[in-house]
Image (cartoon, helix red, strand yellow):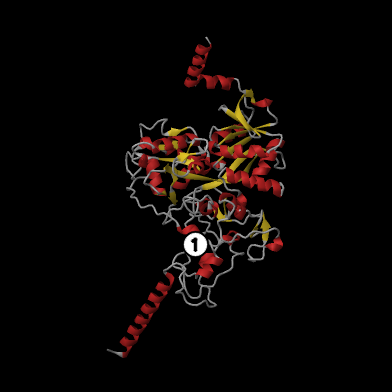
Amino acid sequence: MKKSMMCALAALAGSGVLTAALDADAADCSTFTNPVYVAGSSASKPIWAALAPTLTGITIVYQSPSSCVGLADVLGGTPDTSSATYYSGTTTGACTNPGNVDIGVSDVFPTTCANTMVGTGFKDFQGPVQVMLMAVPYSSTATSISADAAYTVFGWGGTQYPVSPWTQYTNIFIRANTSGTENMIGSAIGLAASKWLAQVPDAGASQQEGSSGAVLTALLGAGSGANASSAIGIIAADLGDADRGPPGTNDAGAATGGLKILAYQATDQSCGYLPDSDATHFDKINVRQGRYDIWGPIHMVAAVDGSGNPTNAQAATILADLTMSGTSDAINQSVIQVDANAHVIPQCAMQVSRSTEVSPITGGGMASFLPPEGCGCYYESLKNGGTPYSKYCTACTSDSSCTASTSYPKCHFGYCEAQ
Amino acid sequence: MSSNHSLRLGIVLFIATAGTALAYGCSSNNDNNNPAPSNHDGGGDSTASSSSSGSSSGSSSGGIGDSSGGADVPIIDTGSCMSDASTCNSCYTTQQAAADPLNACAPETVNCIPFTGTVPTHPTL
């Protein structure tokens, strides 16, 4: 009897029924301490997971219906219908009945999403920089892609106007047209999200993945196939960086790696750039200085009062942290660590800014940027084993110890910065 | 051969020789073949602030301090040598490159990978 019950449970688990049953038993999201409902970009997941342990008395309830849907949710004042995950300190799990969305999180500017405008009573808070990637299996022969090549590959999928080696549309992995990843890359290469693989009549669900994680899984799967070089997909750096490099296993025995990031050559560039100084570093120097083109600040839209302050106090705390405004140096330092762990870039480590979406026509409003409290060296130290990558970085304990260069007189987070 | 003709030929030869010398001096990365620094600022392009073109074509490749619009970056005098590309100030000596470490000739940025594939002519979607 006991054995047969165990067999039945095993069978249920194998079929996924047990998982569903456990989800059904998940707690109501509202029972957690001060839940803040965040919905939108699936690519932003690592940020919320990394942020939660730094918060006190706040539970993040996160849903990932895609960037544009999350914005529609918050602007419409409605709950999101996708599955919810709570992050309370270091504890995480599924929860049910999520409330109205407090923060709509998007990888793209709200105006990039169809029929979306942040009107009176709402505000777009811009957080750390998200970098979007075109990636291939690690074993692929490809190393670089141009804007025009990407336009052709993702427009026709190799069925017409083939671009080697991406000539097999079943190995081309994209997202839905509400995805921030697809909208941002689409804006960069000049291909509207609604037109991706639109010339491939047979392209279906296996090409249009439901999340960044699903694209990653598909690419890693294609890497073990016979035509690995024909595979390509789009993914945010916060997910892609975690599996960059040769395939292997971690200490826990889990599969890791298997992904290669393609250098991107924008329309008027003569050479492609990786986001980082090379394939083995994580400094994002070519993003931070504007050579790698496909990036933008993460947008967090929330309801605000007449003074522009978030109406939800807990949401206000989260937004202040992620925008590094009105918080202490200690909190800012922990947020920089959160960003570094999540493979996004704090604004204080940027040397360029962007006022509109990346675009080959407008340039995406990119301009020189001097962060008021620079953290480029500290960010690099976090990403490079404690040693900043840039040569200008010198350690300091106070402004008075920044004497090596008059260009970098301010001591922030242990390093001399411009201001 | 008339004296006028000789004069013109001399001028042409002088220009050609000077041009060749200048091109040689500017064509290698951070070598020491450049003219000695003078009061003429020929390297301003390398320290210019980021382009607002957004193309990220490297025009934002000034020194680390270019985020300030160039104000906090020392203007490095490269004499009469004109850089051969806006993305890489090959006029820099090793010492000058060290003072402006993230110009596009620097190791941090020189590892670009050109796309070498062929894209067929296609219509606009």
Q: Which residue is mark 1?
A: B106
The location of residue A216, given as percent across then percent down, is 46, 37
**Which picture quadrant has residue A312?**
top right
Task: Tell me residue A286's x, y (percent).
Answer: 51, 54
Which amino acid lies under the numbered mark 1 shown in the image of this protein?
A: Ala
Q: Quadrant of the C terminus of chain A?
A: bottom right
**Horizontal side, residue A153 vs residue A300: left or right:** left
A225 up-or-down from A82: above or below: below
View extreme (bottom): residue: B3
Res. A230 image quadrant:
top left
In this view, the residue farthest toward the left is B1
Rendered location of residue A73, percent (x, y):
59, 32
Residue drawn at x 45%, y 35% as measured from the top left:
A217
Residue A362 rendering spot, x and y as whole percentages? 50, 51
Label 1: few (<14), some (14–19) or many (≥20) C-alpha neighbours in 10 Å: many
Furthest-top residue in this view: A1
Apparent side of residue B11 relative to residue A251 in the rendered image (left or right): left
Residue closest to the eye, B24 or A278: A278
Q: Residue at x 71, y 63 (%)?
A: A400
